[in-house]
Every structure is written in structure tokens, then in C-alpha cells.
Image (cartoon, rainbow, N blue to C red):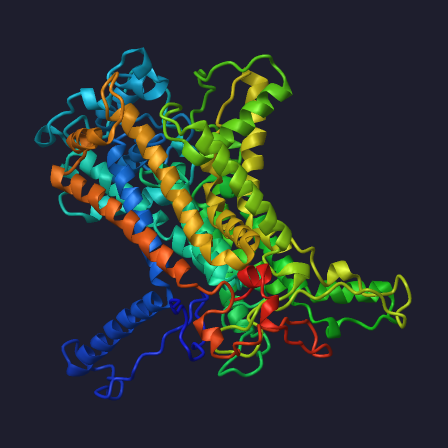
């Protein structure tokens, strides 16, 4: 028995984010709208407030009902893992966490946004963070010093919790004057720092809280930002018309990346970039599908309606909003406008009506003009215009003020502490870059290493994801030979426009005069290729910078796998689709296989972290050591011991619950193709018919025995 993911009746018109709007019962007590003279305490105002609250809670409840319980449980486990990492990594153990927090602290105290080289870290932040960067813990934390005899966190007695002072008590916002490098985070846009400053300012008395409690509030902000990633991965897969099995598998994959969990659990500007880029991918999935929210669709099972400008505009505006948020987050988002343009182009190619093409007797130039005129100029211009106007101005400002789109935040060339890479050659750098990106993508657990995952886990995860990703890329997220997907729930019409078959020939059309197939139908991998663009752009950008730095310093600099996390949703969808296709008739096991892999990756990562940070020198990890490690973690945590133990226990319980629920759904035969709602419109002895792109070629049903990998991947 499978879980139902959609209502049996056709949903109302979707909102701008592609989530169907939920209708709510009318309030019989509602009277006519109050006039302008109505007073706030009038009974009608009270009824209006109750209705508004009821609608809001109803919409939230409806959304929760539309998301499968397994996906909600996977998301809860993701949040629990983030919370776990937020306590097993002590304050200041995140990537450049002291510098990120210092930017928030400066905004709180009116420091504004200084230019490159002008922002020195504040005394209040440096008072405790210096222990990790240049003080007592630096050798163990930065250089693997535990192997040389440096004590671990388990052997160091932290400042007792009641004696931990606030930033103001530890020195306040005044800058340090010891000649160190400035805070380089001025090179980034201020969005997430302004949000963090606003959050702390809104909490009464937060200025007097201990420094680690203030940092933990900012960590919670980042956790909230990355919490929706599994949900967005599932929603993107389903919006593209993939099967529920592939959607759940996509939801699991972010949990399989311990490095992402580590980054998401500390305060930085990566979290807001991951959220905005993932939400942008979800919105553009509708564009790729050729079915913008509120546009093409069906009501009450009737034929698909023509695309409406209102829905098309709404989708474009949402794409522009998320693009703007990404651009105001970090420089690695600067190439995302190309993804928006590519999505509209591929969506146009997939959605073109072959019957609307110009007659082949028209001149080639006229046909080309007609093709150009039919491009989605308006929605693409809206999306790019909103995104660049609201987010691109910051980078233009940088160029005007400093002569560079992203200036050197230090204002000077800093001394490098990375090791030399010899012999000096391109191949030396390339080998270092490729292996380091893979290592730190999966498990950037230390600064830099150790702790680190076992190479077997890293190589295995890399090979598996690359293999299934290539299958997903080659399949085009559809059935074999470019076949379309099954009907949407509650509709007899295709949920996703089919990919038209390439013409095999036409005797009536002179050679060289046919409408070019490449202008009608994209190559099969076009859709998954667009999904992978954020990660690909980041990889190329990091590689270009790293090579430039290597030529200058002969060192591997700024090679961080976390820069690829903005593309995690696209990677998850393509990999899950590829695995489902490989499994074929056993595709219902896709989420279970990925979940087991995720649990193993997290277990290996937690073992490495606890063995290095939370066990003493010469102490080997055994199950009997778990209470000792947990007790050491609790001593360093910003909150009472009971809170830490609750987080750890809840995470363990959610791991077991997720494994049980996902295993039960697989054993009970979660349909790899149609969901329960689709079964209402199909018989037991007939599979979902393939779709074609023209009414001149009616669909022909296929027998149920033909269902295979295409059902697992390309059927809703």
C-alpha cells in the first residue's frame, strides 16, 4: 500500500511557486466587508482575523498533506543531523565562522560595510575565536596536531558555561590593533549578515547573552535556511514529472553529504546560497517542463488550456526573486543568470507546437525570423530583469568603487600557508584539484584535514553518484527514446509535454527545407544538463581561480568542495533518476538504497569527527566510548547538558524511524510509475500510454508488461 501524495480531485490553480492553492471552506458567519469607519474591535474584524488565521493554517496543513510522510521524515532527519553537527563542532569551528559572525556584530553596532582591507575583526569576537586560529587549539584544529601530541577538545576544559561572557564584555566592537589581516568577508554581499543582525537585535536582551549562545542563534538561522533542501529536491523531481520513487530518492541525497551537513550547521553565507539556488532550480523545473504555474494545465480532467501570460509572468517573477537572493549571497552565483536563460530556451524547445511552424515553402530567413519571434523573450526578460536589478546592482557597485566585480577582501595579498605542490606543472595542479574537490565535497570535516572520511567511503560515493548521474543525464529524465510521461493526477492529459520524436524523413519536404529538428527538439540530456549547471558553473569558477593562484604561488588555494553545494538539488534529482532507471522494475528501492548509503556516510563521518575531536590521545573508538564523547561534547555546547543529549537522542531515533518508514514503503511496493491517484484512471492490464507531440499522432496504449525503467523514471 503506497502513500498518497496528491488529492484525488484536480487541485485548484497553482500559486506562483507551483504549489496548488488550497481551497478553504467559507465561513458562514462572514458578513459583508466592514466599511471604512469600522473599528479594530468590531466583531467583523475579529471574524476576519479568525478567517485569515484559518486560511493560513489550512494552507500549511494542505501542503503537509500533499507531501508524503516519508519525505517529511527525511527532512526532519536532515534537520536533526544539522542540529547534531551544530553541537559536535564547537563555536568557531565552522569555515571562517569568526569572520562571518564579526560582520553581523559590526552591523549590529553601526559599522556599516567597509571597503576591502578596512574591516578589522572586533575585540569581542577575537577574544575567544583566536584560540582556534592562532591560540591554544590552533595546532590541533588547523594542522592535525593531535597526531603530534596536541590535546583534543575532550582533553581541554572549556570555560564554565556561567562564566562565558558576551561579545560586549569580551571587548566589544572595537577593532583589534595587532596588525593582523583584515576581515575579508567584506568581499561578499551583506544580505545574510543583515538578516542575522536583525534577528539578534529583535531578541530581547541578546546583547547580554554569552558569546556562544549568540553564535548559536546565527547557526540556527543557517539551519533554517538549509532545512528545506530535501523537500525542494523532492518537489523538483515531482514537478519534472518523475516518479515518486525518484522524488524520494532525490530528497535523501543531501543527507548523504556530511560536508554539506557540516556547512549547514555553522554560520556562513553558503546556507542562503544553497536555499536560493535550490529554490531557483525548483522554479525553473516548471519552465523546463513547459508548464509554468497557473499556465498550461487542466481543470477537472479537461484538455490542457493554452498558456496564460499571468501564470508565465508569475513564474518569471519568482525565478527573478530567487536569482536576486542568490546574487546577494555570494560570488559563486554570478553565472546563474545563464542557467535562467538556458532553462527558458530548453523549455521553449520542448514546448513548441510543431503545427505552428512556418510553412516549409517560406524562405529560410522568414522561418528563422518566425523562430526568433516565438522565443520566450518576455518571461526570460522578466526573470533576468528582476534578478539582475534586485541582485546584480551590488556587483556593479563593486566594479564602480573598486575596479573589480569581486575585489580582494583583504586589500592585500596575504601570506599563504597551504603546502607547495611540486613539481610545478599543470598536471600536478589538476590531480590535486580533482581529488581535493571530491574529498571536500563529500567530507570537508576539518580545517583542512583531519578529521576526514575514509578514502574507501569517498571513492565509493563518488563512483556511484557519477555513474547514476551519467545515466540520469543520458536518459534526459524521461523514458527510453525520449518518450513522455504519464498523466498528471486527476487528469487524462499528459502531465509533461512529450519530447517529440526526431523526423525520419518526409518525401513531401525538400531536403534542406525542413524545419530544423534542433530548433524543435533539444538533445535528450538538455533538461538534466540545465539542472546540473549551478554545480558545473561553480566547479569551473573554482578551478579557474585555483589555477590562477597556483601559477602565482605554486600552492593549492581556495579548493573547497562546499562551493558546489548550491547545485545539490539538481545533482540529487539527476542521480536519483539515474538510479531508478538502472534499477528498472526494482526502482521502488531507490530511496531505501540512497538512505542506507546516507546513513553509512554520516556514521563514518561522525566516527571520524568524534575520534579526532572528542576522544583523548591514544584512545580508540568503541561503542563503550560513546557516552564519554557525548559528555565531552555537552561540556563545550552553549546550552545545558540535557539539551545536547536530547539532540543526539532525537537524531538516533529519527534515523531508525526513517529507515523503517522508507523500508516499509519499498516492501509494500511503492509504485515506481503512477501514484495511487493515477491508478484511478488506469486499468490493471494497461500501462500508461506514451504521449506524442501532435494531435495528428494519437497515443497508443502499451501493455502493462512493457513497464520498465521508463515507468520508474518518467511516470508520475
82 horizontally vs 241: left or right: left
Judge left or right: residue 266 versus residue 186: left
Q: How many labels does the image show?
A: 0
Give the answer, above or below, for where 407 lies relative to 467.
Answer: above
Residue at the image point whose x is 12% and y is 41% from the top:
642
Name the quadrant of the N terminus: bottom left
- In the picture, measured across the screen, residue 454 lies left or right of residue 473, that is left
Residue 475 lies, with reference to residue 243, above or below; the image says above
Q: Can residue 605 be seen in this view?
A: yes
Q: Is 42 left or right of 545, judged from the image as shown?
A: left
- Residue 70: quadrant of the picture: bottom left
Q: Position of residue 171 (x, y in %)?
A: 18, 26
- Judge by depth and name the residue closer to the eye, 5 or 122: 5
Residue 513, percent across and down?
87, 65
Residue 269: in sight, yes or no? Answer: no
Vertical placement of 154 versus 26: above or below? above
Question: In this view of the protein, which residue sits in the foreground, 556 or 590?
Answer: 590
Q: For the point 26% across and 88% down, which residue is it?
A: 32
Judged from this view, the residue extending furthest toward the left is 162
Q: Residue at x 40, y 33 (%)?
A: 186
Amino acid at each position: 500500500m503506497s502513500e498518497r501524495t496528491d488529492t484525488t480531485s484536480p487541485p485548484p490553480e497553482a500559486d506562483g511557486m507551483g504549489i496548488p492553492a488550497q481551497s478553504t471552506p467559507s465561513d458562514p458567519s462572514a458578513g459583508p466587508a466592514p466599511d471604512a469607519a469600522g473599528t479594530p474591535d468590531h466583531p467583523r474584524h475579529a471574524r476576519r482575523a479568525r478567517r485569515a488565521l484559518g486560511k493560513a493554517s489550512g494552507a500549511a496543513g494542505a501542503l503537509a498533506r500533499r507531501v508524503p510522510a516519508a519525505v517529511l521524515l527525511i527532512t526532519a532527519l536532515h534537520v536533526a543531523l544539522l542540529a547534531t553537527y551544530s553541537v559536535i563542532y564547537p563555536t568557531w569551528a565552522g569555515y571562517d565562522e569568526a569572520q562571518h559572525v564579526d560582520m553581523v556584530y559590526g552591523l549590529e553596532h553601526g559599522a556599516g560595510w567597509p571597503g576591502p582591507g578596512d574591516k578589522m575583526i572586533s575585540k569581542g569576537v577575537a577574544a575567544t575565536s583566536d584560540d582556534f586560529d592562532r591560540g591554544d587549539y590552533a595546532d590541533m584544529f588547523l594542522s592535525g596536531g593531535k597526531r603530534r601530541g596536541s590535546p583534543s577538545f575532550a582533553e581541554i576544559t572549556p570555560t564554565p558555561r556561567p562564566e562565558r561572557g558576551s561579545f560586549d564584555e569580551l571587548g566589544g566592537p572595537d577593532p583589534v590593533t595587532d596588525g593582523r589581516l583584515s576581515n575579508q568577508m567584506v568581499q561578499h554581499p551583506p544580505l545574510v549578515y543583515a538578516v542575522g543582525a536583525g534577528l539578534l537585535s529583535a531578541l530581547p536582551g541578546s546583547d547580554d547573552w554569552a558569546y556562544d549562545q549568540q553564535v548559536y542563534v546565527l547557526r540556527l538561522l543557517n539551519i533554517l535556511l538549509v532545512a528545506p533542501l530535501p523537500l525542494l529536491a523532492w518537489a523538483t523531481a515531482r514537478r519534472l514529472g518523475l516518479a515518486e520513487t525518484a522524488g524520494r530518492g532525490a530528497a535523501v541525497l543531501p543527507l548523504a553529504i556530511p560536508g554539506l551537513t557540516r556547512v549547514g550547521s555553522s554560520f556562513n553565507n553558503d546556507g542562503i546560497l544553497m536555499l536560493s539556488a535550490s529554490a531557483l532550480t525548483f522554479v525553473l523545473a516548471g519552465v523546463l517542463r513547459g508548464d509554468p504555474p497557473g499556465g498550461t494545465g487542466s481543470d477537472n480532467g479537461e484538455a490542457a488550456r493554452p498558456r496564460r501570460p499571468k501564470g508565465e509572468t508569475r513564474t518569471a517573477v519568482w525565478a527573478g526573486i530567487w536569482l536576486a537572493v542568490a546574487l546577494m549571497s555570494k560570488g559563486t552565483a554570478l553565472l546563474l543568470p545563464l542557467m535562467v536563460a538556458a532553462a527558458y530556451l530548453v523549455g521553449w524547445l520542448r514546448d513548441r507546437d510543431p503545427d505552428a511552424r512556418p510553412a516549409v515553402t517560406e524562405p529560410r530567413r522568414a522561418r528563422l525570423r518566425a523562430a526568433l519571434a516565438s522565443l520566450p523573450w518576455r518571461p526570460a526578460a522578466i526573470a533576468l530583469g528582476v534578478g539582475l536589478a534586485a541582485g546584480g546592482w551590488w556587483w556593479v557597485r563593486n566594479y564602480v568603487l573598486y575596479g573589480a566585480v569581486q575585489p580582494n577582501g583583504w586589500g592585500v595579498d596575504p601570506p599563504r600557508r597551504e603546502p607547495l605542490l611540486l613539481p610545478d606543472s599543470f598536471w600536478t595542479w589538476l590531480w590535486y584539484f580533482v581529488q581535493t574537490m571530491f574529498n571536500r565535497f563529500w567530507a570537508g570535516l576539518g580545517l583542512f584535514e583531519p578529521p576526514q572520511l575514509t578514502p574507501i567511503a569517498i571513492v565509493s560515493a563518488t563512483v556511484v553518484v557519477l555513474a547514476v548521474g551519467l545515466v540520469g543525464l543520458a536518459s534526459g529524465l524521461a523514458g527510453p527514446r525520449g518518450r513522455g510521461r504519464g498523466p498528471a493526477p486527476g487528469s487524462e492529459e499528459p502531465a509533461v509535454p512529450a519530447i517529440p520524436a526526431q523526423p525520419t524523413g518526409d518525401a513531401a519536404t525538400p531536403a534542406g527545407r525542413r524545419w530544423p529538428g534542433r530548433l524543435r527538439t533539444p538533445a535528450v540530456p538538455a533538461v538534466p544538463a540545465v539542472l546540473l549547471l549551478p554545480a558545473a558553473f561553480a566547479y569551473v569558477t573554482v578551478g579557474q581561480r585555483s589555477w590562477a593562484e597556483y601559477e602565482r604561488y605554486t600552492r593549492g588555494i581556495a579548493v573547497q568542495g562546499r562551493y558546489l553545494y548550491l547545485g545539490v538539488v539538481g545533482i540529487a534529482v539527476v542521480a536519483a533518476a539515474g538510479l531508478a532507471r538502472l534499477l528498472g522494475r526494482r526502482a521502488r528501492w531507490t530511496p531505501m538504497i540512497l538512505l542506507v548509503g546516507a546513513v553509512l556516510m554520516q556514521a563514518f563521518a561522525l566516527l571520524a569527527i568524534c575520534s579526532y575531536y572528542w576522544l583523548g590521545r591514544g584512545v580508540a573508538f568503541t561503542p563503550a566510548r560513546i557516552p564519554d564523547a557525548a559528555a565531552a561534547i555537552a561540556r563545550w555546547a552553549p546550552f545545558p547538558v540535557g539539551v545536547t543529549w536530547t539532540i543526539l537522542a532525537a537524531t538516533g531515533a529519527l534515523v531508525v524511524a526513517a529507515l523503517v518508514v522508507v523500508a516499509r514503503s519499498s516492501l509494500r511496493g511503492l509504485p515506481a510509475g503512477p501514484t495511487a491517484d493515477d491508478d484511478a484512471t488506469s486499468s490493471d492490464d494497461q500501462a500508461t500510454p506514451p504521449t506524442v507531440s501532435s494531435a495528428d499522432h494519437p497515443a497508443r496504449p502499451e501493455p502493462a508488461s512493457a513497464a520498465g525503467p521508463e515507468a520508474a523514471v518518467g511516470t508520475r
